[in-house]
Image (cartoon, rainbow, N blue to C red):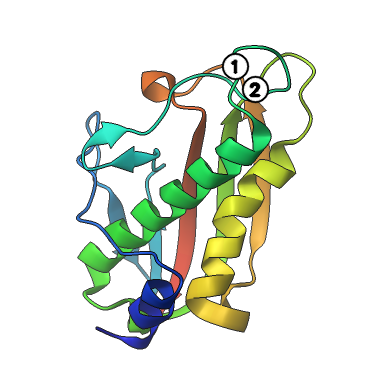
Amino acid sequence: MGAVEQRLAEAGIEIPEVAAPVASYVPATEHAGLVYTSGQLPMVSGTLAETGIVGEGVGTVTPQRAAELAQICAVNALAAAKAVVGDLDRIERVVKVVGFVASEAGFAGQPAVVNGASELMATAFGEAGQHARSAVGVAALPLGAPVEVEVVLAVRD
């Protein structure tokens, strides 16, 4: 186990097997020193952890729970990256995180939700986990997921 996975393990987080794609794509690809992950859903052991839209209303996924789900998405993104690069210690820097949040009308807390993914990257990579980011509200996500996260990572040779 490398240093990145050790830091995550100390935080109680284990890198799972790569989540199977839900359509026609690969989970991650490497090109010109960068790994691009496909959007990762909050899958746990092959099952979507939760469905619904994020908001403050009755019957919605709470922003706090959605941030937890964003962390799961980020862990799945690291699993996809690991499958391509072999060892997460080869990751030099987290370049960008993009989070999509299936949002209730009027909900504007997407940045706090995507913090779940950003904080995971800081736990895993320390200062090298600081990144550019977008947090986008959308009407719906695949399989009814509340959140989806993709990342771009710089890789050492």
Q: From what the image shows, is residue 148 above or below residue 23?
A: below
Give the percent coordinates (x, y) of residue 9: 36, 74
Give the residue drawn at x 21%, y 63%: 83
The reply to whether dot 1 and dot 2 touch (C-beta < 8 Å) is yes
Count neighbours of disc 2 (C-alpha within 10 A) and say few if under 14, some if 14 to 19, many if 20 or more: many
The image shows a total of numbered marks equal to 2
Q: In this view, does 152 lie to the left or right of 110?
A: left
Disc 1 to disc 2, C-alpha distance: 6 Å
Give the percent coordinates (x, y) of residue 126: 57, 80
Give the residue drawn at x 65%, y 42%: 113
Q: From what the image shows, is residue 94 above or below residue 46?
A: below
Can residue 146 be seen? yes
Can residue 157 be seen? no
Q: From what the image shows, is residue 82 above or below residue 3?
A: above
Could you tell me which secondary element the residue under label 1 belongs to?
loop
**Which quadrant: the C terminus?**
bottom left
Could you tell me which secondary element the residue under label 2 belongs to?
loop
Location of residue 13 by image quarter: bottom left
Viewer-side residue, 90 vs 72: 72
Viewer-side residue, 45 vs 28: 45
**Which quadrant: the N terminus?**
bottom left
Residue 103 tag number: 2
At label 2, which amino acid type do we have?
Ser
For label 1, the residue is 139
Give the residue drawn at x 36%, y 62%: 78
Q: From what the image shows, is residue 79 above or below residue 103?
A: below
Give the percent coordinates (x, y) of residue 38: 37, 45
Viewer-side residue, 43 vs 38: 43
